[in-house]
C-alpha cells in the first residue's frame, strides 16, 4: 500500500485498500480461507478532497471555447449535459433514449456508481439539446459511437484541446459535476438538495459543498457587525476609527 501510494498517489492506494479488504472478506465469507483479514488494521491515507470547479471568470472562456467546438460526434452536447446535470460522465456517455421522458423532462439513470437507479429532472438547456438530437436519432444511444460499446467514449483529446483553447489548467471532466454542486451551494441550496441532484448515497459525500455556501455565513457576520455598531451608538463613525 505504501508503494502504491508513492508511485500512484494516496487516492489510488486508498482504493486498493478498499478492494483488497473486500476481496479477503469475500474469501472468508465463502470459506475459501479461515484466516483473519490482514487488511483490517490498515488505515487509509489522509487526503484532501478535490475542490476544483469553474469560477465565473473561467466559465466565460470555457463556454466560448465550447461553442467553437465542432459537434459532429456530439461531444459539445455531451459536455453541456455533463455540466448542467452534474451526472457522472459514464452515465452521460451511456445515456439511452428509452431512459428519457422528454414530455416530463426527466432522465432515469438505470445504474449509478452506488449501484442504485437515479431519476433526475432535466433543466431547460439540456431539454433543448435533447429535443434537437432526437430529430436525428439513429440508435438507442443519445451519443452514438463507432466503437464496440456503440456509444461515445470519453473524448480525452478533444477535452485537452478545449482546455488549451480556453486557457484552463488542472481541470478534469469530473470537475464539471463539481461545478454544478458548487454553484448550487453558492446559490444557498441545501446540502440535501445538492446530494439529491448529484445522486449521493451518503451525506458525507455532499459535505464538501458546505464550505461554498458563503451567503448565510456572510449574512450572520453582517448582522453581528451591525449589532456591534448599533451598540456603539449612532454617533460612531466606523471609518474614522484608527485600527492601528
Image: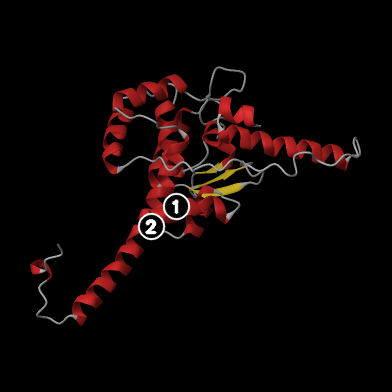
Q: Does residue 160 appear left or right of residue 120 in this picture?
A: left
As drawn, the label of residue 147 is: none
Query: Looking at this view, is 97 or 161 the one in front?
Result: 161
Q: Does the CB distance between marks 1 and 2 fall below 8 Å?
A: yes
Instruction: Tell me residue 103's x, y (percent).
Output: 49, 48
Instruction: Tell me residue 129's x, y (percent).
Output: 41, 36
The quarter of the displayed image where residue 148 is located: top right
Q: Which residue is mark 2?
A: 213
Q: Does residue 185 appear left or right of residue 114 in this picture?
A: left
Q: Does residue 222 appear left or right of residue 217 in this picture?
A: left
Look at the image and tell me whether residue 69 can be seen: no
Q: Quick check: 212 above or below 136?
A: below
Look at the image and tell me whether residue 214 can be seen: yes
Q: Which of the image's four quarters has the N terminus?
A: top right
Query: Looking at this view, is 195 or 14 the one in front?
Result: 14
**Label 2: element kind:** loop
**Label 1: element kind:** helix
Query: Looking at this view, is 149 or 189 the one in front?
Result: 189
The quarter of the displayed image where residue 141 is located: top right
Amino acid at each position: 500500500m505504501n508503494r502504491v501510494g508513492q508511485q500512484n498517489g494516496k487516492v489510488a492506494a486508498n482504493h486498493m485498500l478498499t478492494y483488497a479488504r473486500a476481496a479477503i472478506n469475500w474469501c472468508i465469507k465463502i470459506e475459501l480461507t479461515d484466516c483473519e483479514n490482514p487488511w483490517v488494521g490498515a488505515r487509509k491515507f489522509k487526503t484532501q478532497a478535490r475542490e476544483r470547479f469553474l469560477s465565473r471568470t473561467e466559465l466565460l472562456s470555457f463556454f466560448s471555447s465550447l461553442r467553437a467546438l465542432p459537434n459532429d460526434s456530439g461531444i459539445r452536447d455531451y459536455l453541456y449535459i455533463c455540466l448542467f446535470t452534474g451526472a457522472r460522465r459514464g452515465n452521460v456517455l451511456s445515456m439511452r433514449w428509452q431512459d428519457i421522458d422528454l414530455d416530463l423532462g426527466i432522465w432515469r439513470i438505470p445504474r449509478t456508481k452506488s449501484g442504485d437507479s437515479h431519476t433526475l429532472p432535466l433543466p431547460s438547456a439540456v431539454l433543448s439539446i435533447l429535443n434537437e438530437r432526437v430529430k436525428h436519432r439513429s440508435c438507442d444511444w443519445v451519443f452514438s459511437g463507432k466503437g464496440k460499446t456503440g456509444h461515445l467514449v470519453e473524448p480525452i483529446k478533444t477535452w485537452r484541446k478545449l482546455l488549451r483553447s480556453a486557457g484552463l489548467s488542472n481541470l478534469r471532466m469530473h470537475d464539471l459535476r463539481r461545478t454544478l454542486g458548487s454553484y448550487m451551494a453558492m446559490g444557498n441550496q441545501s446540502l440535501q438538495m445538492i446530494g439529491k441532484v448529484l445522486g449521493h448515497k451518503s451525506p458525507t459525500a455532499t459535505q464538501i459543498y458546505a464550505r461554498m455556501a458563503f451567503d448565510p455565513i456572510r449574512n450572520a457576520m453582517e448582522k453581528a457587525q451591525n449589532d456591534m455598531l448599533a451598540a456603539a451608538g449612532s454617533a460612531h463613525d466606523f471609518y474614522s476609527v484608527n485600527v492601528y
